[in-house]
Amino acid sequence: MTTASKITLMRIALVPFFIAAALIEFPWHEYVALALFIIASATDSLDGYVARKYDQITDFGKFIDPIADKLLVTAALLIFVERGQMASWACFIIIAREFMVSGLRLVAVEKGAVIAAALSGKIKTAASVFCISVMLLPLHDEVLFATVTVDMVCTAVILLTTVYSGVEYFVVNRAAIDNK
């Protein structure tokens, strides 16, 4: 197993600890959860860097890396739903986009095409990691103006970037789903 794949598996292994830290109340649990989330998120860039630099790009890595990303982000979203920080419908839209883009990529592969990550997808990922990090902090209930909370703004940013990048993936890669 490559070093890059080991880093990816470490990200998956951190998910249960992240969930526990976010949901089990103990002193500074929010900060422990935040630290675990940031470490796990950083491994996404690290495993990609290691895989490219040391020529460790493997089929297993291509398979497991997006799964690791989705497990971490989905865990965070479900934590927010459980804690009342995010509406379940918003969580559903975000997760549905992930399934749809993954499905699009599978169809493209069957046709011999590879769908590379788009800039909007990278922006979505960065915005999501930032907003999830903010929502993990104990200031998430803070009212910014009128009745708009930090959680509401972060959820809106995640939703907007998620929907935009999802639509872009399908528009740009519509040939992958044509029946031709």
Image (cartoon, rainbow, N blue to C red):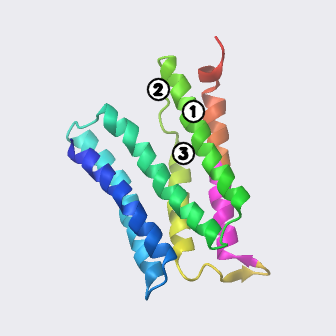
- Identified by mark 3, the residue type is Gly
Which residue has dot 2 on it? 114
Picture quadrant where residue 140 is located: bottom right
- Identified by mark 2, the residue type is Val
- Identified by mark 1, the residue type is Gly
Quadrant position of the C terminus in the picture: top right
Res 103 label = 1
Which residue has dot 3 on it? 121
Labels 3, 1: front one = 1
**Which mark is first along the chain, 2 or 1?**
1
Residue at 66%, 31% (x, y): give it.
171
Above or below, comparing residue 103 to residue 9 in the picture: above
Assign a secondary structure to mark 2: loop
How crowded is the residue under tag 1: few (<14 C-alpha within 10 Å), some, or many (20+)? Answer: few
Query: Residue at the top extreme?
Result: 180
Residue at 59%, 22% (x, y): give it.
176
Q: Position of residue 13 (x, y in %)?
A: 34, 58
How crowded is the residue under tag 2: few (<14 C-alpha within 10 Å), some, or many (20+)? Answer: some
Assign a secondary structure to mark 1: helix
Assign a secondary structure to mark 3: helix
State yes or no: discs 3 and 2 in contact (Cβ < 8 Å): no
Q: Position of residue 160 (x, y in %)?
A: 68, 54
Above or below, comparing residue 153 to residue 32 in the picture: above
Alpha carbons under labels 3 and 1: distance apart: 15 Å
Residue range of the region highlighted in magenta in the rendering: 148-162
**Which mark is first along the chain, 1 or 3?**
1
Alpha carbons under labels 1 and 2: distance apart: 12 Å
Q: Position of residue 99 (x, y in %)?
A: 59, 41
Q: Position of residue 124 (x, y in %)?
A: 56, 52
